[in-house]
């Protein structure tokens, strides 16, 4: 299955049909919910101080719903009109704006306490028009974000980079704009469950010049555990079936006799002397 | 669009004199929302109250106060008015205009969502 980012620009990819999936498809909703909850956990909001959060690529409002639950107000930006219409229909409590984050956005300086983004910023690394320069778009995006976040504000971006070049493009743009932070990788050993979160802070006491990749959650996902147990049980069952009978024992002899009878051969009767231990008397060595 | 985001938003195209955007309303609705006192008290320091007050009075709510009253955490009447104005008044159709005389860019509002996307030439 090819990545969405290689098919169409996001405003066309997230059309009416695709947007409806975000309301109806449980699998998508579950994934987005897990990502949102984890990102909010990484955001570490202080409920007494935080009152305004920027949701970048808010889409149909799934992540926004969890922000509302945390007791914060939020402003959502998205490039897809269809997705925002879904959010509007679902009566999300946040504010919705149709905007292209690669073009930049302007709010009053320092109004936002934090920023969150789920499955979005990798779109900045691809361009569908000659006029769009991914490097420039990443730069403009992080500069716009820096301007509207308060000092020491934190931002968490869950994203799906295609390759290391995309990770570098994004992290270097963030660093240039004045952010410092790390990339957190959850479940790094599972191809399916692995997720990347860019966790940054504006300013801060020690502005590092690079970003490290640090390990997040590492426990085996429940899905993988179930698969492993299933395989083990299957193996045990198979072994039981094939349990070998000891050679030369009475049971073995009787079974052999039954088999020969079935084959139609002449077989001596089974008596109390069958398989009895004999005294060789030195005749058979 | 509700007035909370209007209080934060600036013109995407120009850098100076780009706030606040002028609102022209063609259609607005009131949709009730649960009043949360703590949430709204937290939000008050973020607001440019002068801009909010001017906007609200231009839109027809003449009694809205020009300043934040003292002892605001006890003034339930004011808080409920603020809640109505920030969270319950939805501008479904209209436009936002940049106040900069050399810009004057129009951002249309459709289905309650302002369109801030710039064309290729404007970037």
Image (cartoon, coloured by chain):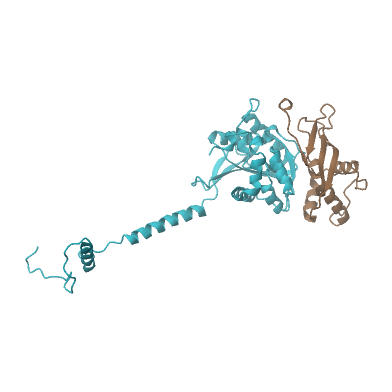
Chain colours: A cyan, B brown
Q: Quadrant of the C terminus of chain A?
A: bottom left
Left-right relation of B30 to A224: right
- Image location of residue A265, percent across then percent down: 18, 62
Q: Is residue A270 left or right of residue A190?
A: left
Asked if residue A202 can be seen in this view, the reply is no
Please state the horizontal and vertical placement of residue A63, each as a whole percent of the image: 66, 48
Counting every numbered tag in the picture gives: 0
Up/down of A142 relative to B72, above or below: above
Outermost residue on the bottom side: it is A272
Image height of A210 relative to A266, above or below: above
Q: Is residue A238 visible?
A: yes
Taking depth in this image into account, of B52 and B73 the one nearest to the observer is: B52
Residues A264 and B56: in front is A264
**Picture residue at 16% right of the left edge, 68% below the top:** A268
The answer to which quarter of the image holds residue A106 is top right
Give the residue furthest to the right. B62
In which quadrant of the rendered view does residue A197 lie?
Answer: top right
Where residue A278 appears, as percent x and y from the top left, is: 13, 70
Q: Is residue A129 left or right of residue B95?
A: left
Residue, far front: A264
Percent coordinates x, y for residue A226 in the rendering: 48, 56
The residue at 53%/35% (across/down) is A164
């Amino acid at each position: 299955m090819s990545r969405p980012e290689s098919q169409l620009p996001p405003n066309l990819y997230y059309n009416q049909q695709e947007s409806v999936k975000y309301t109806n498809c449980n699998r998508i909703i579950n994934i987005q919910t897990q990502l949102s909850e984890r990102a909010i956990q990484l955001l570490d909001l202080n409920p007494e101080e935080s009152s305004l959060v920027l949701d970048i690529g808010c889409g149909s409002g799934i992540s926004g719903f969890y922000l509302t639950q945390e007791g914060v107000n939020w402003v959502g930006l998205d490039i897809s009109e269809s997705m925002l219409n879904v959010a509007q229909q679902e009566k999300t409590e946040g504010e919705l704006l149709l905007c292209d984050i690669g073009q930049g956005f302007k709010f009053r300086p320092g109004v936002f306490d934090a920023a969150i983004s789920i499955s979005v910023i990798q779109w900045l690394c691809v361009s569908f028009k000659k006029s769009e320069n991914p490097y420039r778009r990443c730069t403009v995006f992080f500069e716009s974000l820096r301007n509207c976040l308060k000092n020491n504000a934190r931002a968490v971006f869950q994203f799906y980079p295609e390759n290391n070049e995309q990770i570098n493009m994004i992290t270097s743009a963030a660093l240039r704009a004045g952010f410092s932070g790390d990339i957190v990788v959850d479940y790094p050993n599972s191809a399916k469950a692995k997720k990347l979160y860019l966790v940054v802070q504006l300013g801060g006491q020690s502005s590092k010049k690079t970003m490290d990749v640090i390990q997040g959650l590492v426990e085996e996902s429940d899905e993988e555990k179930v698969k492993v147990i299933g395989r083990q049980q299957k193996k045990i069952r198979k072994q039981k079936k094939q349990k070998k009978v000891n050679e030369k024992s009475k049971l073995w002899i009787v079974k052999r006799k039954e088999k020969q009878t079935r084959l139609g051969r002449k077989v001596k009767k089974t008596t109390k002397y069958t398989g009895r231990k004999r005294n060789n008397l030195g005749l058979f060595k | 669009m509700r007035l909370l985001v209007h209080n934060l938003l600036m013109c995407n195209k120009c850098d100076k004199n780009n706030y606040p955007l002028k609102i022209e309303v063609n259609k607005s609705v009131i949709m009730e929302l649960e009043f949360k006192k703590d949430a709204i008290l937290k939000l008050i320091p973020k607001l440019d109250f002068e801009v909010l007050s001017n906007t609200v009075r231009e839109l027809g709510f003449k009694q809205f106060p020009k300043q934040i009253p003292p002892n605001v955490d006890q003034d339930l009447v004011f808080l409920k008015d603020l809640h109505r104005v920030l969270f319950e008044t939805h501008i479904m159709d209209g436009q936002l205009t940049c106040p900069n005389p050399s810009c004057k860019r129009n951002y249309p509002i459709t289905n309650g969502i302002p369109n801030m996307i710039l064309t290729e030439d404007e970037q």
